Image: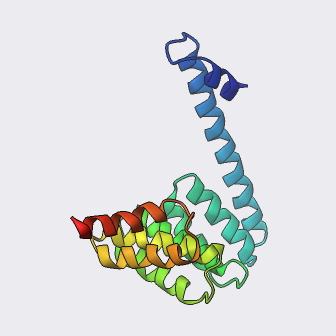
Amino acid sequence: AHEEFLSTHGTDDELYAKKSEELRLARKRRVEILIDDARQRAERNPTDLQLRFELGAQLVNARYFREALPELQRARQNPNARLKAMNLLGRCYRELGMLDLAAKQLEDAAGEILSMDAMKKEIVYNLGLVYERMSEREKSLHCMKQIYEADYGYKDVAVRVESSYEQKIE
């Protein structure tokens, strides 16, 4: 209801700020409930690595990157969640400014997937973003080109790759 109100009323509406704040608080409560639920399930089943992954993913979604690290590191041992956990670990390291660890995590994950499926595209894209933040333009572009060759329409890859050729012409 709050989202509908916000989408139909302008920022100058007197209730806009109130509804916006209520929506923000409701989302925050929802995230905390999801994290608490995931944490309780992981505590009840401490050896279930899938539950560790789910807790780590909830923590990442809530931007608790440091808290997510140990959960995702343990979840890597689960073959079914391994690549997703490595991808999220790379994201955590990137957000924490640990770019070398992010690059290694994502490089390892990308190396485990042979075909350019949806998971590999996401991992290679994230690796390209890490390289970009490390000012390693060629490596970043190489990642984007790998995706471009397989899927022209993936995120903003086409713009990134094509603009690199335009810069060379000038």
| Depicted 6 relative to depicted 142: above or below | above
| Depicted 108 relative to depicted 65: above or below | below
Q: x%, y% of residue 46?
A: 73, 74
The answer to which quarter of the image holds residue 51 is bottom right
| Depicted 6 relative to depicted 78: above or below | above
Q: x%, y% of residue 150?
A: 58, 77
Q: Quarter of the image containing the C terminus?
A: bottom left
Answer left or right for 130 relative to 67.
left
The answer to which quarter of the image holds residue 99 is bottom left
Query: Residue drawn 49% across and 79% down?
Result: 146
Q: Residue furthest top?
A: 14
Q: Quarter of the image containing the N terminus?
A: top right
| Depicted 81 relative to depicted 17: above or below | below
Res 41 seen here: yes
Q: Decide which of 123, 61 is in the foreground and name it.
A: 123
Answer left or right for 138 relative to 72.
left
Q: Residue furthest front?
A: 169
Q: x%, y% of residue 27?
A: 64, 38
Query: Residue drawn 57% across and 25% down?
Result: 20
Query: Residue drawn 43% across and 69% down?
Result: 93
